[in-house]
Image (spheres, helix red, strand yellow):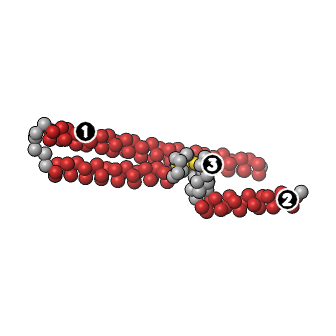
Amino acid sequence: MEFWDDFSKAVANAADQTVKGTEKLTTIAKLKYRISTLKNKVSEYCKTLGELKYDEYCGEQVSEKDYAAIADEITLINKKVAVLEKRIADLSDYVNCPQCGYRVRRGVGICPYCEYVIDAEAAAEAQRKAEEAKAEAEKAA
């Protein structure tokens, strides 16, 4: 009977983990969609800036206020995108190495590609565990 209880608990735990993982992926997908929409707005604003510059080149009067208003909107949107990208990074199981951009599993202290120290605490913990394993292996030998 104990086997079936343990089995039932394991199945329920796996189902819970699957639901949580699915919710996380759905949230990430929604955030990416919002980022895409915002980036499309930036593209439209950049197009408008180009049109204003062309109008100015053709001799029309374009005020600095027109440029500033569009530039301010682009700046605001870029800040929103940065916040959304941070939320995605917080939800993700991976981080990008700040030095080389290699995708590294969260919690890994040193980038396996360029050996940049991403998380000093995680790197120190890994080093400590390696030293413990080495000492234990030497004891056993």
Residue at 87% across / 61% down in the picture?
139
Categorize mark 3 by other alpha carbons within 10 Å: few (<14), some (14-19), many (20+): few
Please, what secondary structure does the residue beneath circle 2 have?
Answer: helix
Residue sitting nearer the eye, 116 or 136: 116
Residue at 33% across / 44% down in the picture?
38
On the rendered structure, is 34 left or right of 103?
A: left
Labels 2 and 3 touching (C-beta < 8 A):
no
What's the amino acid at mark 2? Glu
The circle on residue 69 is: none
The circle on residue 112 is: 3
Categorize mark 1 by other alpha carbons within 10 Å: few (<14), some (14-19), many (20+): few
Please, what secondary structure does the residue beneath circle 1 have?
Answer: helix
The circle on residue 138 is: 2
Residue at 59% across / 57% down in the picture?
117
Rounded to the nearest angstrom, the CA distance separating label 3 from label 1 is 41 Å
Residue to which mark 1 is pinned: 47
Q: In this orientation, does residue 21 appear? A: no
What's the amino acid at mark 3? Pro
Q: Position of residue 26 (x, y in %)?
A: 47, 44
Instruction: Point out the tag, 3 or 1, that comes first from the N-terminus.
Output: 1
Residue sitting nearer the eye, 126 or 9: 126
Categorize mark 2 by other alpha carbons within 10 Å: few (<14), some (14-19), many (20+): few
What's the amino acid at mark 1? Lys
